[in-house]
Amino acid sequence: MQLLVPLAFVAALWRQGDRHGATVPLWWLGQNCWNISVYIKDARAQELPLVGGGEHDWALLLGQAGWLARDQAIGGWVYFVGFVLYMAAILVGWRALSATGAALTPASSPGSPA
């Protein structure tokens, strides 16, 4: 859910044509990848405290897939994907804002010369 919710918002806003608005949940998605990467990298060591206790999800998922020994590499890739998404959000947001001509200037008030 940590990835699906922001991804759903990106898709919905993009489909509505709100390119700039879609960059906010894209940024959120990148941030979530960074957060997830920390727990992926901890899968073997299981040193981080888990909210609510219980089993370490990433140890279970990577163990079942036979990838537990690759937790550091997978976590690194997830972090990198988060970085790419974060930068894409900034660049796409900047371009979308520039394309609309919405310069960061104050709107003219009624009665002021245009």
Image: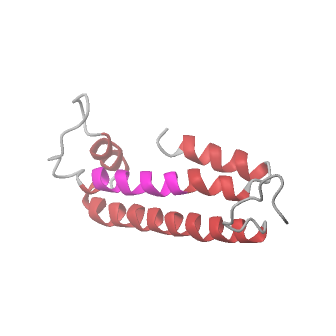
Please state the horizontal and vertical placement of residue 93, each as a whole percent of the image: 64, 64
Residue that appears at 59% across and 48% down:
7
Which quadrant does the C terminus fall into?
A: bottom right
Q: Nearer the viewer, residue 35 or 100?
A: 100
Please state the horizontal and vertical placement of residue 60, each as a whole percent of the image: 30, 41
Residue that appears at 32% across and 40% down:
57
Residue that appears at 64% across and 69% down:
94
> Going by the image, does 36 lie left or right of 10?
left
* Magenta stretch, residue numbers: 27-40
Please state the horizontal and vertical placement of residue 63, each as a whole percent of the image: 30, 48
Q: How many marks?
A: 0
> Going by the image, does 3 lie left or right of 12?
left
Vertical placement of residue 32 versus 99, above or below: above
Per the image, is 110 magenta? no
Please state the horizontal and vertical placement of residue 98, each as a whole percent of the image: 72, 71
Residue that appears at 84% across and 65% down:
113
Q: Nearer the viewer, residue 5 or 93?
A: 93
